[in-house]
Amino acid sequence: MINIDGNILEDNAHISIYNRGFAYGDAVFETIKVVNGKKLFWEDHYFRLMASMRIMRMEIPMNFTMEFLETEISEILKANGFETGNARVKLIVYRNEGGLYLPEHNSVGYTISVRPLQTDVYTLNTSNYEVDLFKDYYVAPTLLSTLKTNNKAINVVGSIFASENELDNCLLLNTNKNVVEALNGNLFLVKGNTIKTPPLSDGCLKGVMRTQIIKFVGQLNDFELQEASISPFELQKADELFITNVITGIQSVTKYRKKEFFNSVAKMLLEKLNVAVRLS
């Protein structure tokens, strides 16, 4: 079952070919992890969605309160039998059809879909996880690149490149040739007692899990957080690399080219993440 503009319909329901999210990528979205029926970091997702809609100059309906959208998500979880289960929820908000590049208006519609998840906690995957740089195309470091929109061509092409080269993931560069993020999450680099992550001004996604990890690092006495540009040269000098997103939590990188990495910091932060999830 799927929610389209508040109507719960069968999965085979269709949207118009003139839908602007389909025709122009004129849409923003949030991917939310649900554990035992609980929507993790929902407040962070909601406020990022509202900020994204404002940046995209979409009208925010009066009824788009945090409570309203949470109820809409709960209803579609219930309709699919996940009200107390584990699921991946995708909430897409698109500008309503009309116009070409220039919209006729800025009103919006939305869809909410769900998929089952097998695990109810964040676990550290310690199997081999190899990455390399994707250098065919670059991220423009602008405010738009920090949003979760339907314009994900570089992520799609990069994922195909990774698959063709037997890589588990790729790291994206911006037009200044700094490392920005992975194809499916934010990047953190550990060197000594410093933990670095690219700043939003470099064009990385304003990730919800990125926000959580930054908060956890701030609670550590033995480490210093830096939001600073990361050059490709630094990757091979690092002690540890890991990637974050709300579904996986933390994914340790085991290998970048000939360099292999540890995962002690990722493991420690993952423990803090699971404590936060249990207490939320």
Image (cartoon, grey):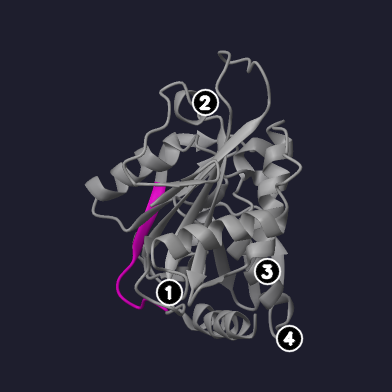
Q: Earlier in the sequence, mark 2 or mark 1?
A: 2
Q: Where residue 184 is drawn, which disc sits there?
A: none
Q: Where residue 85 is drawn, which disc sits there?
A: 1
Q: Secondary structure at mark 4?
A: loop
Mark toward the viewer: 3 or 1 = 1
Instruction: Between residue 145 and residue 220, name the one nearer to us.
Output: 145
Is residue 236 rendered to the left or right of residue 194? Answer: left
Residue 198 visible, this angle: no
The image quadrant that residue 177 belongs to is top right
Q: CA distance from mark 2 to mark 1?
A: 32 Å
Q: CA distance from mark 3 to mark 4?
A: 13 Å
Q: CA distance from mark 3 to mark 1?
A: 28 Å
Q: Residues within 10 Å of mark 1 (few under 14, many from 20)?
A: some
Q: Earlier in the sequence, mark 3 or mark 1?
A: 1
Residue at the farthest right position:
62
Question: Which residue is labeled 2 in the image?
Answer: 20
Establish if 253 lies above or below 161: below
Contact (CB < 8 A) between labels 3 and 2? no
Question: Which residue is labeled 4 in the image?
Answer: 221
Residue name at image x 63 percent, y 71 percent: 213
Query: What x and y, as percent, mark residue 268?
Result: 55, 85
Is residue 38 rendered to the left or right of residue 141? Answer: left
Kind of residue sitting beneath label 2 = Arg
Residue name at image x 60 percent, y 77 percent: 192
Mark toward the viewer: 4 or 1 = 1
Q: Residues within 10 Å of mark 2 (few under 14, many from 20)?
A: many
Mark toward the viewer: 3 or 2 = 2
Mark toward the viewer: 4 or 2 = 2
